[in-house]
Image (cartoon, helix red, strand yellow):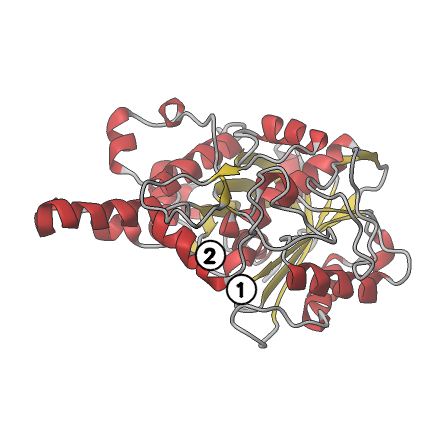
Amino acid sequence: MTRPGNRDIAVIGAGVKAPGGPGLDGLWQRLLAGRPAMSRYRHPDLPEKISLVTAEVTGFDPGSYLTPAEQRRLPRVHLLAIGAADDALRDCPDRPSPARCAVVCGQSYPSAAFLDEGYAKIAAHGIRGLSPLSVPMMMVNSVAAHLAMRYGFQGPCRTVATACASGADAIGQGAELLRADAADLVLAGGVEGVLGLWTVLSFYRTGALSQCPDPDSASRPFDRDRNGFVLGEGAGFVVLQRLADARAQDRGILGLVRGYAATCDAHHIVAPREDGAVARRCAELALADAGLTPADVGHINAHGTSTVFNDLAEARAMAELFGPSPPPVTAVKGVTGHPISAAGAVEAIVALRSLAEGVIPPTGGYRNPDPAVGLDIVHDAPRPTSERTAMSNSFGFGGHNAVLILSAP
C-alpha cells in the first residue's frame, strides 16, 4: 500500500546523452539557442535517391565510463544508457539496500547498429561470424539487466516498450513503485539506438520521416511546413526517491514527479486519433493524479514530433483541455530530433531544468505558425517563467499516451 505523505516523488539525479549534448548542460545551452543538432544521414549502402537527416549523439566518450573491453563488447545503445545512468547516479553514492533499488528502462528496439553488423558478419564469414553473445546483446530487456548488474540493484527490473511513450512511462512506473513501497530508490528513463541502415530505411518506408534535406529545417514541430520527424538516438535517466525520504536524507532535489497517467487510443497502429480525445483524457488523469487542475500548469513540454497529424492531434487535445488560453508550449524535438524511447525521459528532464532555471527554451525549427494548431508556441528566443509546474507529453506508435506532471522542488 502507498504510505501516507509519499505521493510526491523527488528527482535526485538526472543524466542525458542526446543530440546537442551529450550532457545535460550542453543540451540545455543548445536548446536555449534553438539550434537543431541534426545532420545528413551517411551510410555506404544508402540508395543514392534517398536523402535523409538524422540526429546522432556526438561528443560522447564511452571511455569515460567503460573499459576498452566493455566498449568492444557492448552495443551502442548500452553505451548511451550507461553514460546517462552513471551521470544520474553520480550524486547518489549512498543508496538503500540493493533489494530496495529498482530499474525501469524504456526501450522499444534492439540496437540497430548491432543488427546491421550481425548481417554483415554473416555475409562475410557465415554463421561463425556471429558472437555467442548475440542473443543477450539484442534482447530488448538487456539494457535494463545490464544496468541492474552494473549497480547491483536487486529490486524490480523492468523494460517498458511503448514506442515513443516508453521513457515517460518508465518514469511514471518508477514513481508508482515508490508509491507502492515496492522500492526505496528507482533508476528510470529511456534509451534508443536506432540509427542503423535497416531501421532508418524501415522508418523511411512508413512515410513518417521528414523529406527535408536541410538539417536546420527538417524537424519543425507545430510549424505550418512540417512534413515528418527526424529519427534520432539518445538516453535519459533520472533517479527517483520518495520526497519524504529525500528530505530526511538531505538529498539535492532537482524537481518532483507529481502525477502520471497512461492511456491508449485503441485506434491505429501508427496514426494518432485525430481528435486527440484519448490523449486529452490521459492529461486529465495525470492532473488528477497530481491533485492539480489545468490552471496549475505553467508550460507544456509537448511531444511535438513535427509530423502533420501527430502535432495537430496533440494541439487539439491541449486546446480541449486548456481552453482558449493554453499555457506556453515548447517542443524539444526541434533541436534533438526524435530519439523514440528516450524522448519522454529526455524531455521530462528538460522540463525540470526549465522549472529550476525559470526559463522555457524555444522550439527549434519553428518559423511559420500553423493556424490549425492554435497554441502559444515558444520560438525564436527563450521565455522567462515564474511558474512551478509543467506538463510533459509523450505519444507513441500504437496509440500509447503518457503524461507526466512535474514541479519545481
Left or right of 407 in this view: 2? left
Q: Residue 168 in the image: state x and y as whole percent.
A: 58, 53
Q: How many marks?
A: 2
Q: Residues within 10 Å of mark 1 (few under 14, many from 20)?
A: some
Q: Which residue is mark 2?
A: 204
Left or right of 403 in this view: 115? left
**Residue type indicated by callout 1:** Phe
Compared with 228, 31 (above or below) is above
Q: CA distance from mark 1 to mark 2?
A: 15 Å
Q: Residue furthest top?
A: 64
Q: Residue at x 57, y 32 (%)?
A: 20
Q: Residue at x 73, y 44 (%)?
A: 366
The answer to whether any part of residue 145 appears in the image is: no
The answer to whether any part of residue 126 appears in the image is: yes
Q: Residue at x 81, y 51 (%)?
A: 297
Q: Residue 13: give its label.
A: none
**Residue type indicated by callout 2:** Tyr
Q: Residue 33 in the image: state x and y as whole percent.
A: 70, 29
* Tag 1 secondary structure: loop
Q: Quadrant of residue 357?
A: top right
Q: Quadrant of residue 117?
A: top left
Q: Residue furthest bottom?
A: 267
Q: Residue at x 78, y 35 (%)?
A: 380
Q: Residues within 10 Å of mark 2 (few under 14, many from 20)?
A: some
Q: Are marks 1 and 2 in contact (CB under 8 Å)?
A: no
Q: Nearer the viewer, mark 1 or mark 2?
A: 2
